[in-house]
Structure formats: C-alpha cells, structure tokens
Amino acid sequence: MRKAVLVTGASSGVGLALCKRLLEEDHELHLCLACRNRSKAEAVREALLASHPLAEVSIVQVDVSDLQSVFRASGELKQRFQRLDYVYLNAGIMPNPQLNIKALFSGLFSRKVIHMFSTAEGLLTQEDQITADGLQEVFETNVFGHFILIQELAPLLCHSDSPSQLIWTSSRNARKSNFCLEDIQHSRGQEPYSSSKYAVDLLSVAVNRNFNSRMDLDEDTAEKFYQNLLELEKHVRATIQKRNHQS
C-alpha cells in the first residue's frame, strides 16, 4: 500500500525540496501538495511526475491564512484519504523586515550592541497584517491555520496500529523572549515571525502529547522508558570516555 504524505507550502522553497527528497526515498509515494496557488502547484506536480513516474502526486488547494479555505480543504482530504501517514506543516510567511532606527541608535550605546548586530534582534522589525478572519496574519498562517488543519484531519491521523507523524517546519529564529502567552498572536510586538515559530515549537509538544493520549500508550511507561534511556546514555558516555582514556 502506498504511503500517503501531505505537505503544505509544497510549491516552492523548503516545501518543494522536501517533496523531491520524499520521492527520492519512496518512488511509489502518494504525495499530496497542499498549496495556495493551484496553477503553480500543477506545474510542480507535472515536474515531479516527470522525474518520478511511479509516484502518485495530487493537489489540494488551501490557504492556511484563511480558515474557510482550511475547512474546505480538510473536507476534501477526508473524502480522498482513509489515512495520512505523514503530514508536513511547512507553509508560512515572514514579513519583510524594516530597520528600527530608534533601536539602532539606542543599541549602539548599550552592552547588547554585539548581540544586536549578530542576531538583528530588535534591530529589524516586521509589519504584520490582519486577515479576513480578524487574526494576525503571521500567527494565522504559521500557527493557527495549521492547528485547525490537524484538528480537522484527526480522523486520518489517530490510528493506534500505525500512528501518523506530524512534522512542523520551525526556525532558528524561534525565541522565547519574543513569545508571550498574554499575546499569543504577537499583536503588540515587533517580531511576529520569531514569536510564531516559538509558538510552533510549543504547539508541536502539546499536539504530540494530546494525540498520544488518544492512543493506547501509557505515559508512566513512556517516562520510565525515557529515564532508562538517560541511564543508558550515561553508561555509554562513561564507557566511551574510559575507552578513549585507555587509548
């Protein structure tokens, strides 16, 4: 049976590179391209099939910054598939950064000047927008749209015999300092992308825990197993150090 894989933001960048890699690993994969622009997705589909003729490549049109689009696409996917083996939550946006002149001059005379210029934190700001759903665009696109998508697709994901895998595209730019639980959409901040990617990291942990609770998994056993692995890690490290010392 073909493995079924859904990739959001599959028509360019990381998403497209991921699709190519997946097909290289499994030539008979059923790959579903979840894209906002159908004509662009069609061109990508033709190119992928030309290089991997044994694969099955389909398209679902979805804009994760539009909840109606997400609901519509979810319904379509539930009609097409009995299950999804892998879901890559990759679609996202990053607003064009703008120089924060005030932060530049104040930072020049602070202890954080090296950090500011090496990371651009506080030096570059991003202008966010409000979507038709009344949400911050970066938050809805990078976080909430995907959250609604996996909530809607839960019947295709939660199979105790062979659990599906959800993989989020995060970023090294994800910083706890830019995220606030009292402002999860980052409507009052200047780093919406960083905030959204830290939110993705948090959500991936929470979703994993929630989905595991729906399956026949024992949390106590899982924790004991984890502790056993930590003990094994200590033993292996000690053995390697001893071996290196003797040599």
Image (tube, grey):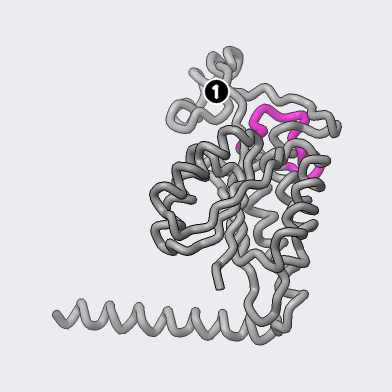
Queried whether the magenta region covers residue 183, the answer comes back as yes
Work out whether 107 lies above or below 63.
above
Q: Quadrant of residue 236?
A: bottom left
Q: Which residue is mark 1?
A: 123
Left or right, 34 with respect to 188, comes to: left
At label 1, the amino acid type is Leu
Query: Can you see residue 74?
Result: yes
Left or right, 41 with respect to 63, comes to: left
Magenta region, main secondary structure: loop
Query: Can you see residue 111?
Result: no
SS at circle 1: loop
Decide which of 127, 152 is in the foreground and name it.
152
Q: Residue at x 66, y 36 (%)?
A: 36
Query: Which percent across, then down, holds residue 35?
Result: 63, 41
Work out whether 63 lies above or below 87.
above
Q: Residue at x 78, y 58 (%)?
A: 151
Residue that protrudes farthest toward the right in the picture: 134
Q: Residue at x 49, y 43 (%)?
A: 46
Query: Which percent across, then down, holds residue 158?
Result: 72, 71
Decide which of 220, 246 is in the foreground and name it.
220
